[in-house]
Amino acid sequence: MIGCKYWHCILLENIQLSESLEVMGNHAFDQCLALREIVLPEKLEVLKYSTFRRCLSLERVFFSEGLKTIESNAFVSCTSLKEAILPESLQSIESGAFDDCEGLNRLRFPSQIEIITKQCFRNCKSLTEVKIPETVRSMESEAFTGCSGLKMINIPNSLTSISYSCFSGCSSLSEIEIPESVTSIEESAFRSCKSLVRVVVPFGVKKIGKSAFYSCSQLRYLTIPGNLVVPTGLYTNVFNSPISHTTIWEGTAVIQQAVLSSLIGGTLVFPKTLQVIREDNLHKYFDVIYCYATTPPTVLSDNALSPECKVYVPDVSVNAYKAANVWSQGQILPLSEAK
């Protein structure tokens, strides 16, 4: 057993661990600032709390196939660590295990991992691509927050929720595919993803949390279900520039209150299934609306459309829209004339 006798051995550069070693204590090599490389023995099953915390020169770790658990903060602030090729034997990675590993540019998960824990890879700024196994059923809050170099990541179909701030600050992420298994997107999930251009929120998503897409300044194309539950102020200052094109999923019958309240300008596309638009959705800032419903949807507010807003509707329904409350405030035109 190694306790914590090497804690803060700032001049230690190399050490060979015994193949018979089974236990290392908390903080075993904490702040060994000169340590560059470590080979973990086969019999070691658990890396304890803060084992290699702030080993600022640590570049390479050879993980053994016997390892089952990496505890919290095991490699926190190992800023020189380049890769983490995690063994197939690994079953659990606890919170903050690789937090602030700014130099980490290669990450491979074992195929059986089920949970990516809180802040596990926060601020791993050199990661550019991450492949999440289909076995993962939960990614906890801030799991990849601040991974500013991340350009590509898959979200597995086994996931039902995108947690608080999970991808916030992933400023290089230009696209994301949200699987149909997801039913909720929590607060600040994609906050400050400044390179995102297009987002398709699956039809089955019932809840989007506050500031989920705050400061996504390049976001131009948005597809969302209309039956979302949104908290007050969700869309206040979420989009730093106008969304060019917002589409409501086919199959939506009711657009719930305030889902569209602060989308400024651009084009709206409503499906033929739409029947009701609740309060605080339509307003004078929309430029063009395409509504495919043959019967004008009931609008439960008097928010005015701009007289300049062009509303394209089925040809057979032009007169009905011209006579309908709120719709009549825009320019009603047949879809056959749409460009």
Image (spheres, rainbow, N blue to C red):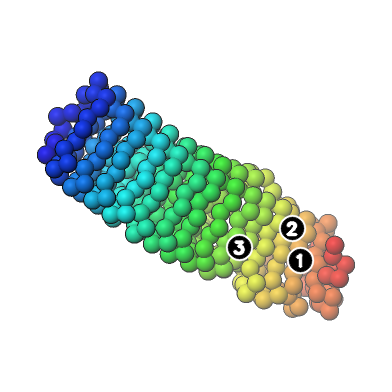
Observer-nearest residue: 298 or 89? 89
Q: Are marks 3 and 2 in contact (CB under 8 Å)?
A: no
Tell me, for residue 224, which label it has, or none: 3
Cα–Cα span, label 2 and label 1: 8 Å
Looking at the picture, which amino acid does disc 1 mark? Tyr
Q: Is residue 52 above or below residue 218?
A: above
The image shows residue 25, relative to residue 65, as above or below, that is above
Task: Report if the CB atoms under discs 2 and 1 are less than 8 Å apart.
Answer: yes
Which residue is painted at 78% across and 56% down in the image? 287
Outermost residue toward the top in this view: 11
Farthest residue, direction right: 337
Residue that lies at the very extreme toward the left in this rendered image: 1
Task: State whether residue 233 appears in this view.
Answer: no
**Which three-letter amino acid code belongs to the residue tagged 3?**
Ile
Mark 1, Cα crowd under 10 Å, few <14 / some 14-19 / many 20+, is many
Q: Is residue 278 above or below residue 30?
A: below
Q: Nearer the viewer, residue 267 or 304?
A: 267
Secondary structure of the residue carrying numbered label 3: strand
Q: Which mark is residue 267?
A: 2
Which secondary structure, mark 1? strand
> Spatial distance from mark 1 to mark 3, Cα to Cα?
15 Å
Residue 5 in the image: state x and y as whole percent: 14, 29
Residue 290 numbered tag: 1
**Residue ID at (84%, 75%):** 315
Expressed as whole percent of the image width and height from the top left, the position of residue 146 reads 47, 40
